Image (tube, rainbow, N blue to C red):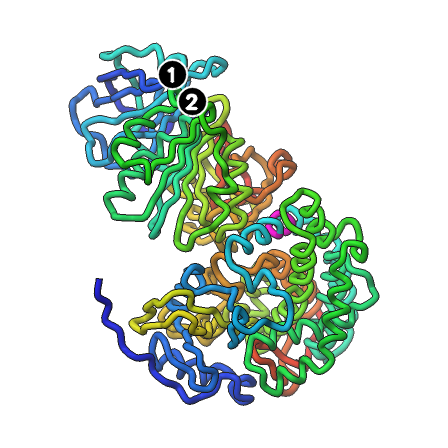
């Protein structure tokens, strides 16, 4: 379980909509009626779901409207209570949340390819809007089990048209054909993918044929499906240097460490080249790179500090820096 | 949209002239100052030497394609001297080969090499530390990669003597067919045949990178011919460049005694020293791309089919990117972003192996050598596209 980070906000559930089979969308407003702080596509909030549980949910409303926030939540039968508690909420219920934070920022590029698996669509929705507003060349490939489980699919198709939005329902046309989708790398195109680990693993494998740094992913943790991965600030102790730095939500370990003047060799800064691989002395990492093998991930002896972070429930990493 | 264009500045100077190869930097400075894009009369190609334009050409792999070959000729029209390598391919052919290679050479497979790569470096540096003078090229830089890299690929001992001459052919062919090219190709068939033999499945051991690449054939990811070409790519790209990387790093450090002292105090900085040295003295100085569709770069119209000569080594010394001291070695500089390994889609896959070899050699040398300084003038190598030294005499004091 991730620790609550920073100040909390008293919010109210303003609206509850069933947007797909097992998926609800909640519209949240501040209890004091004030607007939320500005946020960027890819951001999420912490939601205190009761019994000390905190879950992260990606924002799928528009960053242009700060009077409310919208999240989409998939009900997971075997989850440890997060999604169940959220599904039980009714309009008018008070709810404690955090201000929006961003660990999945959208970087400037000429072209974008968005890949969503199931509820992984949520953080991508504001990205589509931003790409469209900036006149970028973009497409979304959105895969799910069947159309009735795929939240926001119809609205997106209606809004942007079938050329931009490709809905791939498994019961109609089968699974996402990643060889076809990713078999032809494009110059100056970034790939943003969000969904379950199996899909992201397959996307990462194919993106090995893309330029280093092209792929950006947000991985869902199984226990909090429907939520972004653990995103609390954490501390990193630099064993050789003898200092400790706090890594806030909007910075990578690499950035935080460089800010205090400690040097780490890096190249792609996107989890793809492995140059910044750093030995871990203690603590549990959450690997977000595309290069370490399964054995490496399990061994937990090294991590790529340009993208990977501390795991949920691990407030402190000690690194050989 | 209307784009205002102007003619490229026409340059009469030849980058492949002997004097410009032996000491490239004065010419590269003039080329950078001539404008964003120049036209070289000598090769009939356009040239980019500023960081911004070099970066653009490297990253826009749809406009500046590789399948025309890295030399001045367009190998699509006029077939090359060998079947095209991964370097000479575009997506989607490039994509499956790159995926296979990245699956084989990655941080975990390279991390495992530190152990076998260390003892030969210990042995070599121990011997050299007992001498007062040695040649950093022939006694060290040329010896080390040849001891460790062919083993990592898993090729037999027989035929290893062909690796350096073959690499010399491959890289010199990225320049014009001048006397240097002809010299490199004098016994070309023999070297090429020997290297190709070592790329075959039956001639590779069962554990090296070569065998791992061939496993991708069983997985159905690549064809047998592609596997052969990928092993060939490793063998041709992985030896010379690393030798030059080690040699160039030592050539720089011999001139900067304060940096050597700083590194002795803090050997952890070795990899930063290597990175900064690669920026300053980039082994792979230049190659060509081919313009796929009419385009505009730096205000200059480039027609489809034109060749663009990309000067990596000049981009790495562009003062607009690196500041006024771009021509100086600065151990405290953040050299990340340099293009010594290329950038983008075709960025060197072997980069982590090369970095590992260079770091190990430097760290072992730092342990045993208190001071290092030039012992006479270094002899630059005469090469169309690589920058390095034939000989680099140094005088040392043992630690």
Under circle 1, the secondary element is: loop
Under circle 2, the secondary element is: loop
Tell which tag, 1 or 2, sits nearer the viewer: 2
Can residue B257 be seen at all in this image of the molecule? Answer: no
Chain on which label 1 sits: A
Task: Identify the residue under disc 1.
Answer: A21
Q: Main secondary structure of the magenta part?
A: helix
Can residue A138 be seen at all in this image of the molecule? Answer: yes
Task: Identify the residue under disc 2.
Answer: A146
- Are discs 1 and 2 both within one chain? yes
Give the answer, above or below, for where A264 lies relative to B264: above
- Image location of residue B140, percent across then percent down: 72, 72
Chain on which label 2 sits: A
What stretch of residues is rendered in magenta?
A: B101-106
Picture quadrant of residue B49: bottom left
Distance between the alpha carbons at the discs numbered 1 and 2:
10 Å
Of the image marks 1 and 2, the number of the one nearer the N terminus:
1
Farthest residue toward the left?
A33
Residue at the image position 61 percent from the left and 60 percent from the top: B355
Give the answer, above or below, for where A223 lies relative to A131: above
Residue at the image position 38 percent from the left and 24 percent from the top: A150
- Image location of residue B216, percent across then percent down: 67, 47
Q: Is residue B160 left or right of residue A182?
A: right
Contact between labelled residues 2 and 1, with CB atoms less than 8 Å apart: yes
User: Dot 1, crowdedness within 10 Å: few (<14), some or many (≥20)?
Assistant: some
Q: Nearer the viewer, residue A38 or B42?
A: B42
């Amino acid at each position: 379980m991730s620790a609550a980070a920073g100040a909390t906000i008293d919010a109210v559930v303003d609206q509850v909509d069933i947007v797909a089979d097992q998926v609800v969308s909640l519209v949240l407003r501040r209890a004091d009626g004030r607007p939320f702080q500005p946020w960027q596509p890819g951001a999420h909030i912490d939601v205190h779901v009761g019994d000390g549980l905190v879950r992260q949910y990606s924002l799928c409303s528009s960053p242009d409207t700060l009077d409310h926030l919208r999240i989409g939540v998939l009900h997971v039968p075997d989850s440890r209570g997060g999604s169940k508690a959220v599904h039980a909420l009714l309009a008018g219920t008070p709810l404690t949340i955090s201000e929006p934070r961003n660990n999945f920022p959208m970087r400037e590029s000429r072209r974008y390819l968005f890949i969503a698996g199931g509820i992984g669509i949520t953080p991508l929705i504001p990205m589509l809007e931003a790409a469209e507003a900036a006149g970028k060349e973009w497409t979304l490939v959105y895969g799910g089990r069947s159309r009735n489980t795929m939240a926001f699919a119809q609205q997106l198709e209606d809004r942007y048209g079938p050329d931009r939005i490709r809905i791939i329902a498994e019961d109609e046309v089968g699974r996402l054909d990643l060889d076809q989708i990713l078999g032809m790398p494009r110059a100056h195109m970034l790939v943003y993918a969000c969904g379950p680990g199996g899909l992201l693993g397959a996307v990462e494998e194919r993106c090995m044929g893309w330029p280093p740094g092209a792929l950006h992913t947000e991985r869902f943790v199984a226990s909090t499906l429907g939520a972004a991965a653990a995103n609390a600030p954490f501390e990193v102790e630099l064993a050789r240097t003898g200092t400790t730095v706090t890594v806030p939500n909007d910075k990578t370990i690499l950035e935080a460490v460089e800010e205090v003047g400690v040097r780490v060799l890096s190249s792609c800064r996107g989890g793809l080249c492995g140059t910044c691989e750093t030995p871990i002395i203690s603590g549990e990492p959450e690997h977000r790179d595309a290069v370490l093998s399964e054995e490496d991930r399990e061994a937990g002896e090294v991590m790529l500090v340009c993208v990977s972070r501390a795991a949920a429930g691990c407030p402190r990493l000690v690194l050989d820096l | 949209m209307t784009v205002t264009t102007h003619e490229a500045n026409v340059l009469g100077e030849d980058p492949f002239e002997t004097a410009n190869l032996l000491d490239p930097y004065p010419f590269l400075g003039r080329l950078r100052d001539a404008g964003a894009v120049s036209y070289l009369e000598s090769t009939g190609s356009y040239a980019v030497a500023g960081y911004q334009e070099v970066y653009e050409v490297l990253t826009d792999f749809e406009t500046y394609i590789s399948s025309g070959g890295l030399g001045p000729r367009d190998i699509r029209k006029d077939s090359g001297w060998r079947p095209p390598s991964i370097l000479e391919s575009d997506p989607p052919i490039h994509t499956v080969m790159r995926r296979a290679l990245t699956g084989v050479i990655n941080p975990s497979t390279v991390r495992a090499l530190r152990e076998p790569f260390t003892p030969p470096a210990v042995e070599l540096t121990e011997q050299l530390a007992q001498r007062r003078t040695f040649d950093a090229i022939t006694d060290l830089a040329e010896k080390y990669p040849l001891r460790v890299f062919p083993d990592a690929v898993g090729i037999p001992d027989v035929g290893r003597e062909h690796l350096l001459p073959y690499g010399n052919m491959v890289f010199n062919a990225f320049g014009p067919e001048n006397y240097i090219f002809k010299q490199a190709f004098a016994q070309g068939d023999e070297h090429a045949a020997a290297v190709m033999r070592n790329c075959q499945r039956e001639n590779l051991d069962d554990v090296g990178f070569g065998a791992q690449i061939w496993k991708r054939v069983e997985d159905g990811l690549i064809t047998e011919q592609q596997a052969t070409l990928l092993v060939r790519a490793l063998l041709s790209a992985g030896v010379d460049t690393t030798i030059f990387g080690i040699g160039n790093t030592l050539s720089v450090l011999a001139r900067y005694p304060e940096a050597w002292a700083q590194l002795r105090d803090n050997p952890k900085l070795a990899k930063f020293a290597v990175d900064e040295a690669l920026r300053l003295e980039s082994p792979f100085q230049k190659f060509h791309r081919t313009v796929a569709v009419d385009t505009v770069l730096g205000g200059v119209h480039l027609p489809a089919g034109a060749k663009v000569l990309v000067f990596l080594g000049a981009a790495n010394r562009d003062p607009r990117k690196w500041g006024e001291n771009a021509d100086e070695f600065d151990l405290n500089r953040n050299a990340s972003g340099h293009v010594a390994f290329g950038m983008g889609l075709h960025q060197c896959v072997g980069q982590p192996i090369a970095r590992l070899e260079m770091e190990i050699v430097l760290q072992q040398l730092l342990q045993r050598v208190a001071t290092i300084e030039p012992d006479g003038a270094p002899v630059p190598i005469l090469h169309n596209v690589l920058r390095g030294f034939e000989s680099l005499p140094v005088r040392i004091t043992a630690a």
